[in-house]
Image (cartoon, rainbow, N blue to C red):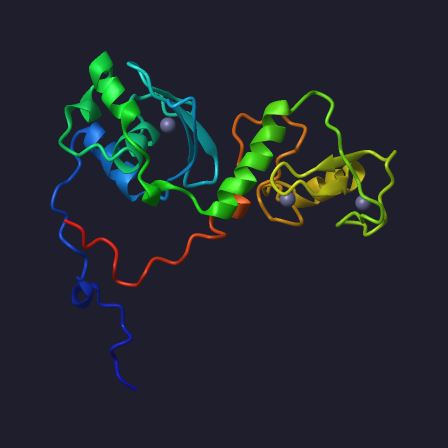
Amino acid sequence: MESVASNSPSSNNHQPPLRFRPIQPIADRIVRALRHHLRLLHRSDQSKFFVLGATGNVYIVTLSTTSSCTCPDRTSPCKHILFVFIRVLGVSLDDACLRRKTLRPCQLNRLLGAPILPEALAGVRVRERFHQLFFQFRQGSSQPVVEIEDGTTCPICLDEMEKCENVVTCGTCQNPIHEECLLKWKRSRGRRSVTCVICRARWRDGADQEKYLNLAAYANQDDPPTAEGNEGCGG
Ligand SMILES: [Zn+2]
Ligand SMILES: [Zn+2]
Ligand SMILES: [Zn+2]
């Protein structure tokens, strides 16, 4: 047996040198905007951008002279706004717009007139899913209408579900589950987070007024694996 297996970190120094360390928070956010798995789902009214975040949450970036984002990050511009600037609209990294909290109307107009870079778009299926779910999400009334097709069985007790039964749906995959069965499942999870028994996304009740639409279950569906070794070479 050779002894190479021992963990000697000194022989494994293949990490690329960090050229620039983000000192200022803004630089740090720019790096995150560039590196994190963010995708554009939809653009509406010219100035609204629906961004699929790394965790599958959908955030809405609204460009204006004081751009805003629905994410919890209070700092402006957050990485989603920067993502829209840089990766969606192709603003160059040395553009002054990136470092301003407010934009002049002429700068804003220039940004809004820019076309979307196709590389920033999420895959077709994720976008389709977004359109379906977002519509329901927005309609999310206090009285969820759970439509159950004949012969649909509860994934937990495997009984057929009746229209009159108390049924809840997974906010992510929309599959119906008996409310009773879900409660039992929740109890059985104890302190662990409750996940959907079908799609395994963190449980969000379709009826809950969740703040964010979450597409985690679809986010990676049709992102083709990046061509090996072909990434990160761009200067
Ligand atoms: Zn944000
Ligand atoms: Zn059941
Ligand atoms: Zn689900």
* 77 lies left or right of 15: right
Residue 34: x %, y % from top left:
27, 40
User: Compared with residue 158, is residue 190 higher up or lower down, i.e. above or below?
Assistant: above
From the image, which quarter does the N terminus lie in?
bottom left
- For the view shown, which residue lies furthest in the bottom direction? 1
Left or right relative to 134: residue 64: left
- Residue at the image position 60 percent from the left and 48 percent from the top: 200
Quarter location, residue 129: top right
Measured as percent of width and height from the top left, residue 170 is found at 66, 39
Report the number of discs.
Answer: 0
Give the camera-side residue of 215 and 200. Answer: 215
Q: Which residue sits at x=22%, y=67%?
A: 8
Q: Is residue 90 left or right of residue 209?
A: left
Residue 162, x across and y down, in percent: 87, 40
Indicate whether 88 appears above or below 155. above
Instruction: Specify the quadrant of the image occupied by residue 192.
Output: top right
| In the image, residue 106 above or below residue 136 | above
Left or right side of 151 for 13: left
Instruction: Name the residue located 17 percent from the left edge and 29 percent from the top edge.
Output: 24
Assign ligand 2 to one image quadrant. Answer: top right
Q: Position of residue 178 (x, y in %)?
A: 79, 40
Residue in front for this viewpoint, 230 or 169: 230
Q: Is residue 145 above or below residue 5?
A: above
